[in-house]
Image (spheres, grey):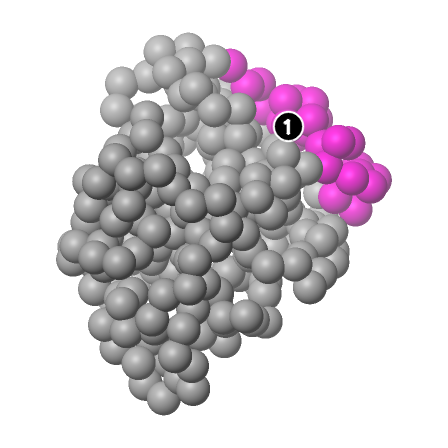
Amino acid sequence: MPTAKPSSVLSAAAAKKLWNLYGFESSKDLVLEDLAMALGVVVLEGHLKAADAWLIRKGEKGIIRVSDAIPELGRRRFAVAHELGHWSLHKTLSQLLSCTSADMLARYKASAPEIEANMFAAELLMPTHLFQPALGASQPTARFVNELAERFGTTRTSTAFRIADLTKDYFALVMSKDGKVAWWQASDALAEYVWIENGGSVPRYSVAAKFFAGESLPDAPQKIDVGDWFSENRGLDAECFYEDVIPMPRYGKALSLLWLE
């Protein structure tokens, strides 16, 4: 039997429906615990082993438990929104769903339900009608991503993902861990032209390489050759990109933001 494909349209529509139903006008109106309660779900924090959150469902009532070991508010919020995605979209699945941090990043290679839950969470926390205008003509620098994350109460990683989802410009984000590329995501405009090999070392002359070498990061985005980051260039008419980095020393990670001016 073929694997079901995730539906971005249905996932986003379900999140938009909640904004319209409850009359939210800004992200400040969106209190996830209150929304969950209105949907029949209680949100709790507590110890979880090998999971960021889980959802248990019994009829029209449910409980979301979020790991109390998650230090970042934005990450906890995304975990709750992700589980609300399962609650809204996947009523016929298992009555107990356990989701890891990897599930919260799922885009293409994971199961359809995990991808749909992330699409729902992204639209719920960073609705298109507010997020896309906020992009304006600003460059996707680390400072700009931080500002958006603060405004929408989200993680910097999910915020950068959302930029890739909604921008019409050439943009990519690359997560590296211990000097190796863990994963990457490009905007639709850029994706058809380039490729980055997962598992490879970060480019020698990249800003990310400075982070992993223990060097001070530059105060401003740096110009880098297209060929430094992208192992394939299928006709992109550009020689240089800008790179800015969001360091994550707690996790031994660096999030590179790449864009064409």
- Identify the residue under disc 1: 32
* Residue 98 in view here: no
x and y percent of residue 99 in the render? Answer: 35, 33
**What residue lies at 50% left-to-right and 21% top-to-bottom?**
63
Is the residue 183 above or below the residue 240 in the image?
above
Instruction: Please identify the quadrant where the C terminus is shown.
Output: bottom right
Instruction: Please identify the quadrant where the N terminus is shown.
Output: bottom left
**Amino acid type of disc 1?**
Leu
Is the residue 222 above or below the residue 192 in the image?
above
- Where disc 1 sits, the SS reads helix
Between residue 113 and residue 253, name the one nearer to us: 253
From which residue to which does the magenta span run? 19-44
> Position of 218 compared to 12: left or right?
left
Between residue 28 and residue 17, name the one nearer to us: 28
Which residue is at the far top? 46
x and y percent of residue 27 in the render? Answer: 72, 37
Q: Which image quadrant for residue 205?
A: bottom left
**What residue lies at 48% left-to-right and 44% top-to-bottom?**
219
- Is residue 26 located in the magenta-colored stretch of the structure? yes
x and y percent of residue 250 in the render? Answer: 32, 26
